[in-house]
Image: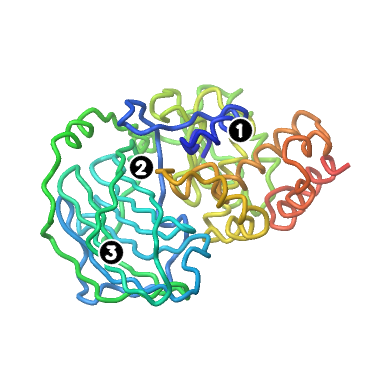
Amino acid sequence: MPGLCSIDNRLKKFCKESGEVCVKSLRTLIAGLVFLAPLWWGPLDARSSDAGVVPQSGAGMIEFTVRPLKADPSDVDHVVLMQASSSDGREFYEIQIVGSDVLVLRDFGPCVRSANRAPHDLKQSGLYTFLLSWNGASTKFAINGREIKGFDLLVNSDYHQHAPFITFGAAESFQTSGIRVSSRSDISPDPADRSLVEQIQCPRLGQLLDAKPQEQYRGVLLYGFPGQPERGRAMGYIDLLPDAVANGIKRIIFVDAAERMGGAQGLTTSRDTFFLRKGYEAGTFFHEATHTLDIQHNAGFSAAWGEKFLRDEARQVAGRRSILGALDSSSASEQLAQFSGMVYEFYLKNKTFADLETVFGPQTKAQLDFLLGNGFITRDVYERLAR
């Protein structure tokens, strides 16, 4: 998803060089566009709420106990502890452990995300009560009664709605128990949060799919392209994709109004759909196509990429206050897509492996092998660049 970079200063140079637009929170009056579908990490090995109750939108609480099982609870790439959607499908909640951080997300309203990422101090076999509360535009999270402050409000995609559900992870690293879901909230709405939400203008991406598709090419429906040259360009890019990638894409939507994309050149919203902004670069097309294949495999490819190439680096680079969490530029999913997009861009510009290695360093050959071995690039693209 180009355009989604951490606001950590150490990543500003990366954002600038990669042509992406870094996103800041609404509290600095710069709104970005973010989207994190529950399908991104795939289905949880999970169980339902003990009471079989799903949360209520508007106001409520989710409380549960967490017991870390590993000697070092921070020795994990990411574990989703809880995911839920409200009874009316209008709100989404998620709590993750990302290394030594806890990431808390709440999507509400037509297109708002409240997000917080902060360090945790969980210890093996300790018992920790996690409490997520919300009321109107305000969100609160606490561990053992200690509030973890720092929630930011962001513009989120309005192209989603979830079926009601609640699940709790049963991963090897953490045990969850003592689940309580309530329609009552222990917090009062903050007028400052309400004021910020009232300033938000939703991107209305879903409306673009109400139109009739212009054309179907290799099973891909094309929407909103301003003319045959732009559609022809997209078709040419589809032809460069391996069948494993192209066959999984069902819709590509061209967005003429840049404000709908929050500055991003591309946006993947589901396992088979992505949006492209007017003036997008070639690499953006393949970046988003890479995301679709990864989502279809429950983020297995990006998890393997992170384990192979990014585990230590991600811990050093990821900003502690990165409110975008799994979608910041330090994440495996974004770096896999970024590398894949650049590979295709270099291919189209008739660049060489040496050119690619200059940008990505000594792991370039192994990363190129990864793309080929997992079906992200064709043999022709590989051999042209590996020469």
Residue occupying the point 29% across, 53% down: 92
Image quadrant holding the C terminus, namely: top right
Residue occupying the point 80% across, 31% down: 351
Amino acid at pointer 1: Ala
Query: Please, which colouring scheme is shown?
Result: rainbow
Amino acid at pointer 2: Tyr
Q: Which residue is mark 3?
A: 130
Q: Earlier in the sequence, mark 2 or mark 1?
A: 2
Q: What label sits on residue 159 in the rendered view? A: 2
Residue nearest the viewer, comparing 4 with 272: 4
Residue nearest the viewer, comparing 8 with 309: 8
Label 3 to label 1, Cα distance in Å?
Answer: 46 Å
Residue occupying the point 72% across, 48% down: 377
- Residue 5, image x and y in percent? 50, 37
Q: Which residue is mark 1?
A: 234
- Mark 1 falls on what kind of element? helix
